[in-house]
Image (tube, rainbow, N blue to C red):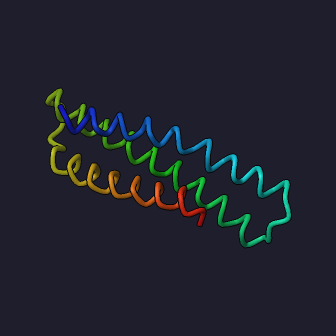
Amino acid sequence: MTEVASAFVIVGLLLVFLPLFLDAVGRGKGGNVSWFKLRWLKVRAWLVTVAVGLGAADATFGLLTLWGTFKLAEATAILLVVLVWTTVGLAALATHGG
């Protein structure tokens, strides 16, 4: 149960990150940044979106395991570890500015 709650909390955190990354893309489009820099800003925003999808899959796997529908406990644990470290990486990108 804790793993599922953790996945939901991380998805919420990532949904806070997403507007920050999208705002950076918007500022990049309106400013004088190189094509490469603008492309990197877009990739960063997509990385957050992918991480949200990863968290949603993790929470779904966990719920299906709790309900006894599927036995996905190992997949849930692996996804949660990947999700946690993806979130750490995105936090580093957000503070560093990439």
Q: Nearer the viewer, residue 48 or 90?
A: 90
What is the quadrant of the C terminus in the image?
A: bottom right
- Of residue 73 and residue 70, the one placed in the foreground of this image is 73
Residue at 65%, 66% (x, y): give it.
Answer: 40
For the N terminus, which image quadrant? top left
Q: Quadrant of residue 41?
A: bottom right
Looking at this rendering, what residue extends furthest in the front direction?
A: 95
Q: Position of residue 90 (x, y in %)?
A: 47, 56
List the single residue furthest toward the top. 67
Residue 9, compared with residue 83, is above or below; it is above
With respect to residue 77, does 67 lie above or below? above
Q: Position of residue 11 (x, y in %)?
A: 41, 39
Please state if 59 lies on the left or on the right of 54 as rendered.
left
Residue at 66% over, 47% down = 22
In which quadrant of the rendered view does residue 86 lie? bottom left
Where is residue 31? Give x, y as percent. Answer: 84, 59
Q: Is residue 51 left or right of residue 97?
A: left
Q: Residue at x 39, y 39 (%)?
A: 56
When the figure is inspected, residue 21 is found, relative to residue 32, above or below; the finding is above
Residue drawn at point x = 44 percent, y = 39 percent: 13
Report the number of discs.
0
User: Could you tell me residue 64's position as x and y percent?
Assistant: 23, 33
